[in-house]
Amino acid sequence: MTRLSLPIGIQTFAEIREGGYYYVDKTGFALRLFSEGKYYFLSRPRRFGKSLFLDTLAELLGGNRGLFAGLEAEHKWDWSRRYPLIRLSFGGGVLHSRAKLDEKIDELLTDNLERLGVSATHRSPSGRLQQLIKSTATAYGEKVVVLVDEYDKPILDNLGDKETARAMRDGLRDLYSVIKDSDAHLRFVFLTGVSKFSKVSLFSGLNNLKDITVDERYSALCGYTEEDLDQVFAPELEGLDRDQIRAWYNGYNWTGDAVYNPFDVLLLFDSRLFRPWWFETATPTFLIDVLKDRHTWLPALGDLRADSELLSAFDVGHISTEALLWQTGYLTIDSQEFVFGEYRYRLRYPNREVYQSLNNSLLRAWTADGQTTLANKTRLGDLLLANDFDGLRDLITAFFASIPHDWYRNNPIAQYEGYYASVFYAYFASLGLDLTPEESSNAGRLDLAVKFNGQIYLIEFKVVEHSGEGAAMAQLKEKGYADAYRGQGQPIHLVGVEFSAEQRAVLGFEVETLN
């Protein structure tokens, strides 16, 4: 098997095809899109290959046949026709005012006017785009293709400043609204971005877009499938644990074929190391801040429910937690069902990278001292390996005792009911352990099943001010939590932990082992 170069960070189709790089053939998707429709929108997380797919579309529609040798499109495309292309990308730079946005749009339109050899006399951004489309169609005697990449980035870069974000949204809405009115001059339109803003807020003037974000036919349009790894990247798999690759990086799903994050896979093959490559480069501070400010009940994150409307509830000043996590790639679709005339979805973490890294980030944001947190996490792993319950009791006690009084007083996170249970859950999750929250909807108490090292731990937290002493172990027994695990042939440990919110201390720690 011949090893090729890894296209790390390369978003140019021609460079990949001419430079001896691996390429996963996505041209079949392009053929289908062009033959079956005209206006499309696709939302995918950052670093998933959206820009490369748009560039592939551009080369296909531009008639560059030589780049498609050996690909699905080579013998299925009419190479005699070439469509004039208008390309807009907001991926470069960061804009922090409406004036800068208008300036950027002007630059993009000017570049297209010069490349296409046409002119426009209108001055407004929307007027210039409309004139550009019409003039191009007239000059070339062919309907125009419009490709927009990172359509939403000017808004996302300013979500922390609602006023500026709204100004960006309004400016982009004005620009995109002219596309519908230019229908007579257009053959194909494709917009991509990270977020899926509601049609009312951003696409009110472009309500004819076909949203293929949640469409099983296009679930694998971006990303690598299992088959892609086994066939295209077969030379890179030697010496790597295939199951470990799958657990770390596979699992993203939009109701069809599951896919791997391309960025992760390429960096794994390059470094031969399992690290949260995508999470380290694509996680916005805004996301962590929102989850922290909303006092998010962490055990529930990996098992949320949503409907189509909730997943689209993304707008400036109104972003549901479910929509935010799903659209940015930290949750993915586990299953869907059609109930009472609407689709409902169950969401989950896509893989170990996201599950472990997100909880790591939240743990750092929710605890007082990074060094102490790291030491506690390392100690927790050692104690579980040794099955040392006395040490575990001492660790949990030390954890609460180590949080400074000033941090409690000045940080509202520490004052909400589910804080202790969420933080303890995050400690386990940050180690990548197999966790199952039993009653994750009941904030303030945590029934947690931990499977590790041939052992099963069923842990119950209670706040004594709410439940009284002895309630943790009593509930573990009364609810019969162990019954569901007795047939697995592993030791089961019931662990009841009780703490006082007023005293900020662990008051009770009971363990009972069932054979």
Image (tube, rainbow, N blue to C red):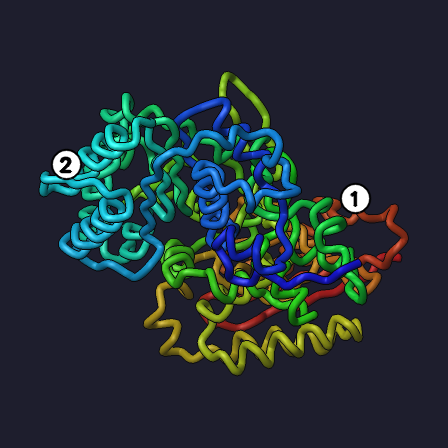
Tag count: 2
What residue is rendered at 39% in x and 63% in y?
A: 285
| Residue 138 in the figure: left or right of residue 325 | left
Q: Nearer the viewer, residue 223 or 313?
A: 223
Q: Amino acid at mark 2?
A: Gly
Which of the numbered marks, if any, corresponds to residue 127?
A: 2
Q: Nearer the viewer, residue 207 or 86?
A: 86
What residue is rendered at 59% in x and 35% in y?
A: 73
Q: Amino acid at mark 1?
A: Ala
Q: Estimate how packed mark 1 is, as few (under 14), some (14 to 19) or many (20 or more) residues with alpha carbons within 10 Å.
A: few
Residue wearing tag 1: 484
Tell us which disc is closer to us: 1 or 2: 2
Which picture quadrant has residue 247? Answer: bottom right
Relative image position of residue 251 (x, y in whole percent) = 64, 47
Which picture quadrant has residue 379? Answer: bottom right
Q: Are marks 1 and 2 in contact (CB under 8 Å)?
A: no
Which picture quadrant has residue 184? Answer: top left
Q: Nearer the viewer, residue 487 or 276?
A: 276
Q: Is residue 383 above or below residue 108?
A: below
| Residue 163 in the figure: left or right of residue 265 | left
What residue is rendered at 33% in x and 31% in y?
A: 144
Q: Estimate how packed mark 2 is, as few (under 14), some (14 to 19) or many (20 or more) residues with alpha carbons within 10 Å.
A: some
Which of the numbered marks, if any, corresponds to residue 367?
A: none
The quadrant of the rendering that contains the N terminus is bottom right
